[in-house]
Every structure is written in C-alpha cells, then in structure tokens.
Image (spheres, rainbow, N blue to C red):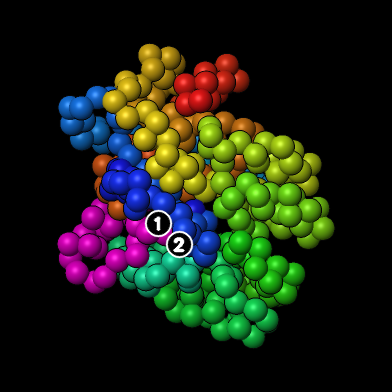
Amino acid sequence: MSSRRDFISSSALSIAAVALMPLAACSQDTTSASITGTAAKPAPKPFSGTLLKRAIPSSGEQIPVIGMGTSGSFEVGDDAASRDPLREVLKRFVAAGATVIDTAPTYGTAEPVLGALIAEAGVRDKLFLATKLSGVTGHNEGLKQFNQSLNDLKTDKVELLQVHNLGDTETQLALARELKQQGKTKYVGLTHYVESAQDELADLMQKLKPDFVQINYSPIARGAEKRIFPLAQDLGIAVMINRAFADGKLFAQVKGKPVPDWAKEVGADSWAQLFLKYAISPPAVTVVIPATSKPDNQTDNLKGGVGALLDDKQRATLVAALS
C-alpha cells in the first residue's frame, strides 16, 4: 500500500505500476535510501534505540509506529536469491521490536512467502499480522479466502482483518466481526489507498465504526487530514498509513538533494526517515507500513520511528521543499 530496491527506475514503469495498483496498493510503498548526491551512500549503521509506540484506541494496546508492508516486496519465488534478503529484512524488523506486518491474499505470493519465512524464523508470537478480505463478494467467498490466508500464513489467527479497498464492505466487515467473536482476529478494519475514496471511507467510519482504517498519506498527499484523521480521533479508530513515500515520487523529487540540516533536530539522517516521521507525526496516526526487500532500507525505515517527530513548522518546511 520500489528506488530503494523498490523505487521504480523509469517513468514508464512507474506509470505501469500505478495502472496495476487497485487490488495491490494498500501496503506497498516504494522506498529509497537517503539521496544526498551522486555518490553512493554507505550502508546504514545497525539499528539502535527504541521504537515509538502508539495505542490502538479501541483496546489501549500499544504497537510500534513503524510496521512493514508486503505488496511487491514479498511477491517473490522460492529461490534463495529472492528469499535470502527477505529473511534479513524480517530479522532486522523483529530485532528492532517492530511488530505490524500488513499483507493481503491478492498480493501475489506475498502471504505464502511471508508465512514460510515467519515459520522458519519462529517469530509468529512476536508479530501483529494484518491481512484482508480482498476482491471477494459474499460471506462464503470471504470465509474461504480468509481460511486460505490462515493456511498461507501458517497461523490460526491474525491480529487485524481488513476489508480491502471497501469491496463488498458491509458483508465483509460483518464477516470480519464474526471472526473476531470466534477469536480468529483481534481487530477489524477498512482500507483504501487513494484520496478520491476518502470521503466514502469517512462516511463508513461514522456508520460502521471499525477498529482500524488504512489510507494513503504523505507530504504530497495530505487529504487524510481533512476528515479521516479528525474522525479517527473522535470515534477512537486506529489509523494505518500506506503509500508514505507516494510510490517513490518523493524520492524522485529529492534526487540529488542533501537531507536538510534541520533533520538533525529530529535525529533523521535520510529522506526516508524524514518522510516516515512526517507520516506518523499527526496524533491520529497509529502506524505506517513502508515496504522494502532491501535489508539496509529496512534499517533506515526503522530509524524513522525513533526519537522526535516533526512539529508543525518542520512539517510545513518539508511540504514546501516538495512543492
């Protein structure tokens, strides 16, 4: 919901990726290492520090503000060249104390790949797994899909079950709530990935009152500030952010530019960290889910959840720099 691997290397490919996005876009984020000029940036130092946490309003449970998406990044085969980097991505994620991983049955091979790597590492009890009811209609089809997700993820329950892109919303959310009563999920949610859907999402938040919503937000896509964030705070709904790097557009806009000096005030030394700190600065935001298949980018992303966030002046400065 990517030129850190995941930053698409040409405009043509970027346009093609967007065209194919409707079912897959909820958690995929194109990520890139700090862009400070033409010289290659050294590998980041190992992660240190403690990730900030935010409470899920409906329960008070605290979760780390940096999570991970799997669209694109975990859609790989079973060869070592594809999976070995993901093993390290997952290892660094867990070692940092991060927990939230977002996926969906419509993200190609992401669920079976993720499930296999989690089982291999023996870390299921350390994770907050979020998946979706995606592209299905009707109770029975939704239930069939969810059971397949459990099988692929090698688990008997998930922490969050979301209705993907508001598809067959009321039927699928009712199913998610049935599964919550059965102990198959702790929380239920609604997702989308474009600003044009935010009014519909806001209306459904008021009507259906899910535990979570997931929506896009970045310095160049701030629509969630209008209705989603205020409603989430008023209604006690957690907010998960996808597309925090605007599918790589942010990195294209800062290519060749040094990270601003004021980034040091919030402990950031990369553009990725600044963009993530921007995304989690609003009090309504609970967690952001950037995706990457590069271990060093994972370390960089995680650092975005340590230390100070951006104040209003810093947020405005970052927006202005990208305008």
- Reading the image, the residue beneath label 2 is 20
Residue at (51, 25) in percent of width and height:
323
* Spot occupied by residue 24 in the image (x, y as percentages of width and height): 48, 62
Q: Which residues are magenta?
A: 69-95
Q: Is residue 274 left or right of residue 313?
A: left
> Does the stretch in magenta take in 13?
no
> Does the stretch in magenta take in 81?
yes
Q: Secondary structure at mark 1?
A: helix
- Reading the image, the residue beneath label 1 is 16
Q: Is residue 234 left or right of residue 129?
A: right
Check the image and report above or below for 70 versus 143.
above
Which mark is drawn over residue 220? none
Mark 1 Cα within 10 Å, few/some/many (few <14, many 20+)? few
Residue at (35, 51) in percent of width and height:
12
Q: Residue 298 is drawn in which quadrant?
A: top left
Check the image and report above or below for 230 versus 322.
below
Label 1 – label 2 distance at C-alpha: 6 Å
* Residue extending farthest right: 207
